[in-house]
Amino acid sequence: MKNYDHKKIEKKWQIEWEKKKIFKAIDGSKKPKFYSLIEFPYPSGEGLHVGHPRPYTGMDIVSRKRRMEGYNVLFPIGWDAFGLPTENYAIKTGKQPKVIVKKNTDNFTRQIKSLGISFDWSREINTTDPNYYKWTQWIFLQFFKKGLAYKTKSEINWCPKDKIGLANEEVVDGKCERCGTPVEKREKEQWMLAITKYADRLDKDLDLVDFPERVKSSQRNWIGKSEGSEIEFKTNINRNIKIFTTRADTLFGVTYLVLAPDHTNIGEFLVQSKNMAEVSEYIRKVKNKSDLERVENKVKSGVELKGIKAINPANGEEIPVWVADYVLSHYGTGAVMAVPQHDIRDKEFTEKYELPIIDRPLVNAKEITEFVGGKMVTKFKLRDWVFSRQRYWGEPIPIVNCEKCGMVPVPEKSLPVKLPEVKSYKPTDNGESPLALISKWVNTKCPKCGGKAKRETDTMPNWAGSSWYYLRYADPKNKNKFADPKKLKYWTPVDWYHGGMEHVTLHLLYSRFWHKFLYDLKLVPTAEPYMKRTAHGIILGEGGVKMSKSLGNVVNPDDIVRTYGADTLRIYEMFIGPFQDSAVWNTESIIGPRRFIEKVWRIGENLEKNQKKALSCSSHSNLNVVNETNIAYRAESVSFGFLKKLLHKTIKKVSEDIESMNFNTAISSMMILANEIEKNDFQISISDFKLFLQILSPFAPHVTEEIWQNLGEKKSINLSTWPEFDPKLIIDSEIKIAVQINGKVRAEMIISADQTEEEIKSNVLANDIVLKFISGKEVKKIIYVKHRLVNIVV
RNA sequence: GCCCGAGUGGCGGAACUGGUAUACGCGCACGACUUAAAAUCGUGUCUCGCAAGGGAUGUGGGUUCGAUUCCCACCUCGGGCACCA
């Protein structure tokens, strides 16, 4: 008798599957395709964390099931390897980023392979590979050619510690998302991507896809669509003020107007005001405020532009004009009408400066807008995407600055613009990329006129490479195109994209934006990249706190795989709680899934033993004959019929639960089945047990493959067909129902499925316990819920 | 402040569309096997009560024959957004 040796078994099948290319996605196969995708990891130096296997195993279960259902499955993996941690490590150690990346991806590869995830490794990609980022640069140039990538001098969020410009999305509470340093403002020439041009479609097309509501709402929230009116107010200085409001219906209640301190026309109002010195001092003070100060201190401040009056177009009343920093210049028109009666911000401001409040009737917003000559407009909170970083470890922006020709795109044949090797990766204090110091690389010829020119030294943000990687998987080695249109047509869109909640606003929005842009260029076949998106919660350390190096509570999956095996780890991570919620790691509980696997192993051993016994007693050597003999013999046993029924119910439950990602309840139902098989003295046929192995195989692929082949199968369990339940077997002929009196359970009864309601009711009324409870009382009503319960109301 | 999500044994959690709350797993206790231990198997494990029976799904109310599930108010925790007019 062999013991369950997870180390031997897991290694053996991982090698075997790889050798036989079981998980290879076949281009243009006649089978229906299924593209399942997980967010590709950032290969950090710390290696895999127990949080990684959860999404991978979840999608692996779906992918393995799809293969067994007859789909040609694309389930790829790659590395999102540009980024700050690697660069910072390079600065510290002086090692080349690409060397660090190689080491980290090798480690990640070893770790992921030890988990038995059915990735198609032949399609592995890496965003830092010049053959990959050539196409990231190429797509950037398409944006540039369409005028959607542009350079502008703008105030950017500057992290003084990381020495890097941040996108708005990377600033959290006025601090750098990565290091927590308060963000400063700096004026800098920046590359921008015009995502706002796609705002409306990014919002509207969410209707086309199957994303969870919480994902859709956070995207919608971020895009921030709102409909309102633009209305012009005349002033006494012959210069109108255009405001944006969603509450034109309150126009009669306006008591003053407010301009943002950095309003485009602020200068004209300033010079004509009677308190110019006071106003310019206020504006200067506000400009120096950091984002953090703005966010932390929400007490409103402002100053009146004395001598300037605006006219309310609705009633001709004269109202004052203020400058206040509670109004944002970048949203709407940078000016608002204040209605303290209906807006808490205006109310707070009014109270602070003791301004009047007037009470006026509301009117129809659309009618009043038309009446005063305004127009209905749609505005978005979404702002254009700051696309430059002053860093080394990113894709160089493929632009050459020529004195004569201006900004010239690098011709396609000269792509990729490769990162040069440098001595120091340290960013400079003046806000320039370290690339700017490499004059040999910077100084070049203009591709247009051949004259002296300089390369753009900014690099792209981390989000660039991950905005289109799912397309490259369709054709990862293509040298002439980012992917062959035929292959894109076959594989895309992604059928099911699974990832973390932390990426549902930024990454998901950015990649949808790139995809839509490529769709407009007719380079991809669908308007949306991902048909279905799901998200999981994170794994927390013991005690419900975040796992971190500083707390010393990080669990390394290598240790778990070594001690308990990959199958146990997989089942544990799927069993730990609802997949979409966060879960608390508890090493003590891992033993449960391990025991379950050992139990399945024991069942396999017992059946194998019986098979051999039968074989030696029998003159037949054909296994199938032996199985049939077993069935004939066992058919007489009551347990045998019971287990067969339970098996089919379990097949149904597991099949459904995988689709809804209720992996924990799927495992629970398989545990129940295994418990019952053992309790009922293994009264299950080998062919039925094999069905059980099949539905368990996506969860625990190694041990099930081993038992499967020990029981005489020659082909991989991965190549078998997903079992279907027999509808006849999931119906019970006898059902236990509850008997309630006034809603309280008093007894149980066994009924047969074909009994009529009348029969059941009269049986219930004859029941001893029931008689005891209803004696001397009047039966008012009897409620029967089919195959559930009878409730007697007295 | 606003918008989501959640609150069930010692712990992780289950419960279909309003229909037997606490499945499954961990832990714990006892028993079997063993020279012994581990492993495994069996039994028990919400709570009060000797029992009959009563009480429990964050709190208080409501609808209903019947509520973890629906409605109202409140409390707590987690996540997102945060001066967007």
Image (cartoon, coloured by chain):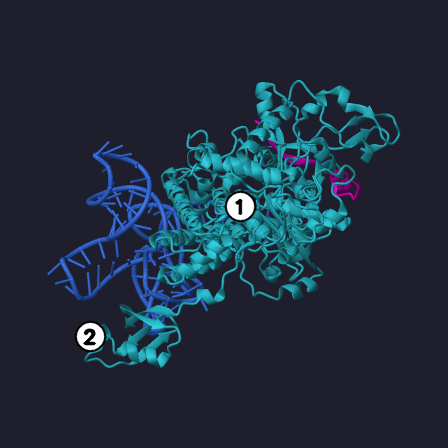
Choose top left, top right, bottom left or bottom right for residue A16.
top right
Residue A618 spot, x, y in % from top left: 44, 52
What label sits on residue A176 in the rendered view?
Answer: none
Q: Please say whether residue A301 is one of the residues in the magenta stretch.
A: no
| Local crowd size for mark 2, using a 10 Å CA cut-off: few (<14), some (14–19), many (≥20) | few
- Say whether residue A77 is visible: no
State how many labels appear. Answer: 2
Question: Which chain gets the blue colouring?
Answer: B
Residue A112 vs residue A491: left or right?
A: left
Residue A468 spot, x, y in % from top left: 68, 42
Q: Chain of mark 2?
A: A
Q: Nearer the viewer, residue A233 or A588?
A: A588
User: What range of the chain is rendered magenta?
Assistant: A139-162
Q: Secondary structure at mark 1?
A: helix
Residue A221 vs residue A8: left or right?
A: right
Q: Which residue is mark 2?
A: A772
Between marks 1 and 2 in the image, the one whose residue lies nearer the viewer: 2
